[in-house]
Image (cartoon, rainbow, N blue to C red):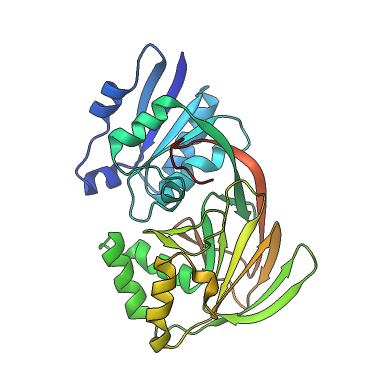
Amino acid sequence: MQKIIFIANKNSLARHKLSIEEPIARLLDTNIFSIEIQYTEYHGHAALLSKLAIDDGANIIVAVGGDGTVNEVAGPIIGTGVTFGVVPMGSGNGLARHLNISRNIEKSLTLISAQKTTLIDTCSVNNKRFVSIAGVGFDAHVAKLFAKSARRGFLGYSRIVANEFLKYKSKNYHLKFDNGEEIFQRALFIAFANSNQFGYNTTIAPEASLVDGLMDICIVDKPKIYNLPSIANLLLLRKIELSPFVRIIKAKKVTVTRKKKRVVNIDGEPIKFEKKLEVKINPLSLNIIINPHGSKV
C-alpha cells in the first residue's frame, strides 16, 4: 500500500471553482493507495505540511496549486527519495508546462496514478531551494507586485508588466561563474532557469533541461519600446536566445552581487535576500511524476 498525501492550496481551488476530492476518490485505486488530502491555511503552510508528511512516512506527496505551492511542497522533499507529484492549479504553472502536465485535474491525476517517475535537478539561492526558475531585477519586481494584486492570471500579470516596464530602471550586477568567468553588467533582469518556463507558456530558456546538471542563466538587457514586438515574437517561437538583448550562459553555480538587498523571484514567490546571492544546481535531487507521453525533461 502506497501512502499518498495531497497538499492543496484551497485558494487556487476556490478561484477555479473546483474540488479535488471527488476525482481523487474516483481515479485513484484504494487497493493501491492510502489517500489523505490536506489544505493549506496560510503562506508557508504547504512547506510545513510537506515536512510533516515525510515524517509521517508518505511515499508520494502531491502539490495541488500554482508555482508557489509547488515550490513550497517540493522543498522538503528534495533529496529524500520521496516521490513528488503536481496537479497544476495556478496562473503560470511553469514546471507543469515544461513537463507537459495538464491543468485538467482528471488528466493530471491519471499521471499520478500511473506513477511514471524520473529524477530531476533542483536549484537553490543562498540555500533556499527552487524547482523551476528564480530571477532578479524586473522579473522579481513584477513578482512582488503580482503577489499583492487581487487580479490573478495572465491578464493581471501582463497589466503589471505594461504599467511598470517604462519606469523600471535596469540594475548593475556582478556575476562570477564556476569556471572563473566574471561579468559586470547592467541588466533589466537575470533569470536562473532550471526549467524552460516563466509560466504562461513564456519560454525564457528554450534549451533548458531538468536533467543536465546545469542552470541556464539568462541575462536580459532592457530593450527600447519599439523592439518589444520582435522580442514577443521570439518568445512565442521559443527562440528568445536569438535576440540581441538576451545572453544565455549554462553553469552549475554563479555568484551574483547587487548594490542593495532586494527581492528575488523564487518560483513566483518574491523573497528578500542579501546583496550577494549564491545560485547553484543540485543535480538529480527530486523524484517527480512525469507525463510519459510528450514530457520534456
| In the foreground, 235 or 16 | 235
Q: Which residue lies furthest to the right in this view?
A: 180
Q: Is residue 159 left or right of residue 258?
A: left
Q: Which of 196 and 157 is in front in this view?
A: 196
Instruction: Return the x and y of residue 288 as percentages of the image width and height.
Output: 52, 36
What is the quadrant of residue 41 in the picture?
top left
Instruction: Please say if 155 is above or below 15.
Output: below
- Quarter of the picture holding the C terminus: top right
Percent from the top left, x then y, of residue 50? 48, 35
Q: Nearer the viewer, residue 247 or 59?
A: 247
**Image height of 190 relative to 125, above or below:** below
Who's the residue at 65% across and 49% down the image? 212
Q: Is residue 38 at all visible to an observer of this figure?
A: no
Q: How many marks?
A: 0
Taking the spot 50% from the left edge, 46% from the top edge, the residue there is: 296
Residue 71 visible at all: yes
Q: Quadrant of residue 171?
A: bottom right
Q: Which residue is drawn at 58% across and 51% down?
A: 209
Residue 19 placement, left or right of 113? left
Q: In this view, does 185 lie above or below 94?
A: below
Residue 271 in percent (x, y) is at: 50, 61
Where is residue 168? Give x, y as percent. 44, 83
Image quadrant of residue 160? bottom left
